[in-house]
Image (cartoon, rainbow, N blue to C red):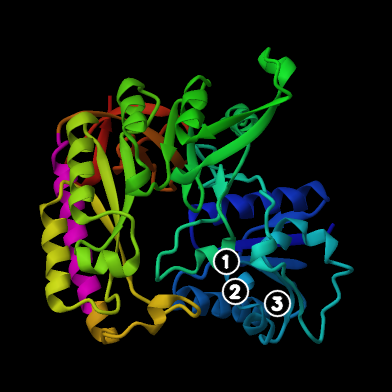
Amino acid sequence: MKSVSLHTLGCKLNYSETSTIAKNFSSKGFLLKNYGEKSDIFVLNTCSVTENADKECRQIVRSVIRNNPETYVIVTGCYAQLQPEEIALIDGVDLVLGINEKFKMFDYMENLDKKELSCIYKTPIDDVADFDEAFSADTDSRTRAFLKIQDGCNYKCSFCTIPKARGKSRSLELEKIIINANKIINAGYKEIVLTGVNTGDYNYESGIRNEELGTNSKYEIRNSRLINVLYELEKLPIERIRISSIEPNLLTDEIISLYRASNKFCNHFHIPLQSGDNEILKLMRRRYTREFYSGLVHKLNAEIHEVGIGVDVITGFPGETEQHFENTYRFLDELPVAYLHVFTYSERRDTDAAGFGGKVDVRERKRRSGLLRKLSDKKRSDFYKRFYGTKQTVLFESQKEDDFIEGLTKNYIRVKVHSENNIENTIREVKLSDDYLCELI
C-alpha cells in the first residue's frame, strides 16, 4: 500500500483544504501517515502571507527531501500559485500545483517516479472560477470542524496578495453548505467553524425553477448572504457555531442580533483591524475608520454577553511613523478586546504597498511588534481574570498523557482541567480559577 503524508502552512482555510486532500488520497487506497514520517508521497499546502511563510515552505521541503530523498514531493497552495518557478528550483520537488489544480492531484500524477525537473501546472488566477468544497478538524479528536463556505477576495488592500493567489470572491451554494454541515455533525463534531478568505463576503446567487417557487417566471434569482447561512445552520443539531474571522464592515446588525438571540453561536469574534491610525488605514485601503471599528467593538461588548474579541494588527507598514504606531497602541490599549494577532509587515511582490515610500527599518518593525505582543498578553490575562470564579461551558479536546485535558470556552478562553476520565469531545461546565486551570462541576 502506498503512503502519503501532508502538512499545512497558514490559515484555517488551508487546514480544511488539506484535510479534504487527505480524504481524496484515502479514498484512493493510500495510507495516511503523520507529517515527519517517511512516506511515498509528501504534500505541502502553502501560505504566502509573509516572506517568513515562503521561507518556511522552502525549509520544510528541503528537510523532507533530505530525510527521505525518494519521496514524491507535491507543493500546492498560495505560494505555489504566486511563485511556482521559485519552488520548482528546489531540488527534489516533483510537482507544483496552483489553486485550481489543488484538488485534482491525481490528474497530474502519471507515476511516483522522481523527476529530474519539477512539473508546474497553474491556471491563471483570472480564469479560476470553481469552488472546491472542504471541511476538516483542527485537532486529531473530533471536536471542532472547519467548514469552507467562501473563497477568494474582491478587496484591494494594498499589502495583500490573496486576490492574486486565490482569485475573485466566490461562495458555496447554501444547500451544499447544509449537506457538508450534516456530514460534520454525523461524524461526531460538536462545533462548526465557518471559514473562508473573506467569510463575511459570502454571497451566492442561484436560479430557482418556477415550479419550486410557485411563480410564473422561468427563473428567479435567490440571493444568499452570510446571515442566511447562519439562520439555516442554527436549525441543525449542532452544539456550537463560530465564525473564524470577519471584516468589521461585514459584521452586520442582523448577525449581531442572531448571535444575541441564539445560544448556539459562540460569543467570540475575530475582527481584523490592521492599524489604529486613520492615515495608515487609508494607505492600506481598508474599508473603515478607527472610529467605526471602535463603535463596533463597543456595540458587541454591550449586546453580546461576555463576548471575546480578537484583533489582527500589522506593524511597520510603509509610512507608519512613531506617532502612527503610538496611535495604534493607545487605541488598542483602550479597546475592550481579549487578544491581538500581531503581524510584522512584510513586503509582498506585486502589491502596491511594496512600492510605497517611508519604509520602516526591519528592526523597528519587530520592536513595535514586540510591544503589541506584550500588550496582547496583558489583554488576554485581564480578559481571563474577569471570569475568575465564574461557571463556563468548555468543549474539551484530546486527553494529555499527564491526565490534563484542554478545551475552549464559547468566548475563546483556552483552559485545562485535571481529569482521570476521558472527557474528550464533551462539553462540560467548569469553574474558572487561576492560571487557566479549572475545576469540573
Q: Residue at x 88, y 69 (%)?
A: 111
Residue 370 inside the magenta-drawn segment:
yes
Picture quadrant where residue 407 is located: top left
Label of residue 165 in the image? 1
Is 50 located above or below residue 239 in the figure? below
Q: Residues within 10 Å of mark 1 (few under 14, many from 20)?
A: many
Residue 309, how many percent across, how many down? 27, 45
The rendered magenta stretch, by its main secondary structure, is classed as: helix
Quadrant where the image shows the N terminus? bottom right
Quick check: marks 2 and 1 in contact, CB under 8 Å? yes
Q: Marks 1/3: CA distance?
A: 29 Å
Residue 24, how many percent across, how many down? 75, 50
User: What residue sits right under mark 3 in the picture?
Assistant: 68
Q: Marks 2/3: CA distance?
A: 27 Å
Q: Residue at x 42, y 37 (%)?
A: 242
Q: Residue at x 38, y 29 (%)?
A: 265
Picture quadrant where residue 2 is located: bottom right
Picture quadrant where residue 417 is located: top left
Label of residue 82 in the image? 2
Label 2 sits on a secondary structure element that is: helix
Left or right relative to 27: residue 96: left
Q: Mark 3 belongs to which amino acid?
A: Asn
Q: Mark 2 belongs to which amino acid?
A: Leu
Label 1 sits on a secondary structure element that is: helix
Left or right relative to 279: residue 219: right
- Boundaries of the magenta span: 367-388
Near-viewer residue (432 or 173): 173
Badge 2 or badge 3: first in the primary sequence? 3
Residue 94 inside the magenta-drawn segment:
no
Q: Mark 1 belongs to which amino acid?
A: Ala
Label 3 sits on a secondary structure element that is: loop
Q: Residues within 10 Å of mark 3 (few under 14, many from 20)?
A: some
